[in-house]
Amino acid sequence: MKTIFLIDDDPDDREIFEEILSQEHPLIAFQQAENGAAAFEKLRSGSFTKPDLIFLDLNMPVMDGRSFLKQIKKEAALQDIPVIIYSTSSSEIDKAFAQDHLAAQFLTKQYSIELLRKDLNAAVENFLS
């Protein structure tokens, strides 16, 4: 079974993402964390399944997405997991940062459920098929 891990501090965004994923891809497991520090705690615990794909928000408290991305790409056991930046930002600076730090893709969060569904389906097809 494939697993997607969403790291996002917005509970509404996590809920909508999980709902769409479960409707569109019921055989993909969903994991979540509210910031980068909580995500690393889960990833480093022995009981957590290593995800096949990570969606990462940039702007979060405690440990933001930029710090998380830099750190995960330094860890031998985790650096091969594709990370999709999933942020409200559409800044060229953020897009350049993502590319420079080996993010697999940069997605600006959609404010339409149907557009989010389309982006999520494309990501699953590109990275998990």
Image (spheres, grey):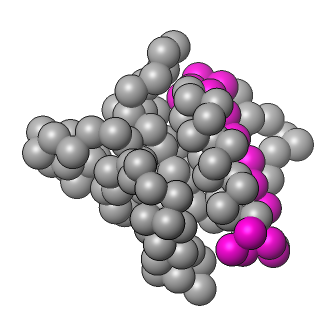
Left or right of 51 in this view: 93: left
Q: Position of residue 106 (x, y in %)?
A: 31, 56
Left or right of 44 in this view: 124: left
**Magenta-tinted stretch:** 23-40
- Frontmost residue, 125 versus 77: 125
Q: Residue furthest right?
A: 47
The C terminus: image quadrant = bottom right
Q: Position of residue 65 (x, y in %)?
A: 42, 33
Q: Quadrant of residue 8?
A: top right
Q: Position of residue 5 (x, y in %)?
A: 64, 50
Residue at 51 percent across and 13 percent down: it is 62
Left or right of 78 in this view: 47: right
- In the image, residue 72 sits, relative to residue 123, either above or below, namely above
The N terminus: image quadrant = bottom right
Q: Residue furthest left?
A: 92
Q: Quadrant of residue 19?
A: bottom right
Residue at 16 percent across and 41 percent down: it is 91
Residue at 27 percent across and 39 percent down: it is 89
Left or right of 108 in this view: 69: right
- Frontmost residue, 21 versus 4: 21
